[in-house]
Image (cartoon, rainbow, N blue to C red):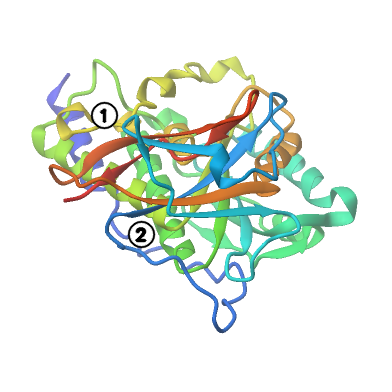
Amino acid sequence: MGGTARLSMALFCCFLFPGFAQQGAFPSPVAPPAEGATVLARGDGRRISLDVVVTDKSGKPVPGLQQQDFTLLDDKQPQTILSFRATDETSQAADSPLQAILLVDAVNTSFHGVGYERLQLDKFLRQDGGKLSIPTSLVILTDTTQGQSAATLDGNVLADSLDSNQSGLRTIGRSQGFYGAADRIQISLGTLEKLVSHLATQPGRKLLIWLSPGWPLLSGPQVELSVKNREWLFQSVVSLSKELREARVTLYSVDPLGMDDSLGRRFYYESFLKGVGSANKVQNGNLALQVLAAQSGGQVLNSNNDIAKLIATCLADAQAFYTLSFDSPPADHANEYHSLQVTIDKPGLTARTRTGYYAQR
């Protein structure tokens, strides 16, 4: 790999999370919590909280389970479940509201893809007379601007907002090679970090549905990372994993182009799904949109062009889910990766939650 490409990679790593000061602040997507309501505390040490969706063979969320139906494994070792809460459409607690965020990504999506995405999103928002199942807000991301609407149960309001915010032509294009790819990653990850930081101030669970084929992975045998670059990248992986978990954000990757084979390597992200345990093993692909989504307990939906239906599939996770907590075992060193698995003591049921976390001493 040439010196120019190596320098570009170093610049990319240094710009992963620069603060994104040029973008406007996100407004509050839901009403402030009522007096007496609680916001999940951050930095509580060993206490880990997980949102778990249990589905049957058809993929439909299953309500009505009890704590004794769950087994929680940390690095394959059973852990004591310290708290348990079941949530369905009739039992949402005032101190733990639900909200969804639909993000239209015009930075990483082709002009054709953005147009199709808008049509499908408008279809979803206006169906059933515009009645939405949970408070939903809309984020529109371009390479120069981003903005977020207030959360509402009226899909027609969001559809009208979408119509009035036509994305302009992007200055960052797919033809701009490595530098353009690095800029897109910087904008995308900076936006994600800022949005998650904002959502952490809000109570309850959040479903962040990112409509995009994802940003470039910039990984492979032709990409070299220095020791310093790897250390910076690994710290970014650890930090973003922690922020998503503590903010109770479940991320979903919905590809507006669906089965469009012209994008190529649609499943290359699967090479990075396993949690990375150290800086000497980290790659840029560990911060791919699809990887972050799967690791957060969300879904990667890229084999269907019916975007309205796929959004509904994501939101179905809010119909019934369970919140468990446990204390993580003491770590031997900082940023020690622990894999997580939840199993259900009933045939035909599958649990989906975060796939791991980074424990501290």
Residue 308: x and y in percent read 75, 38
For disc 1, the marked residue is 283
Element at label 1: loop
> Of 325 and 103, which appears nearest the observer?
325
Q: Residue at x 86, y 48 (%)?
A: 127
Q: Residue at x 54, y 71 (%)?
A: 27
Q: Residue at x 47, y 32 (%)?
A: 290
Screen quadrant of the N terminus: top left
Residue 217: x and y in percent read 37, 29
For disc 2, the marked residue is 20
Residue 19: x and y in percent read 31, 60
Callout 2 crowding tier (Cα within 10 Å): few <14, some 14–19, many ≥20: some
Instruction: Residue type at mark 2: give it.
Output: Phe
Instruction: Residue type at mark 1: give it.
Output: Gln
> Of 91 and 357, which appears nearest the observer?
91
- Quarter-of-image position of residue 258: top right
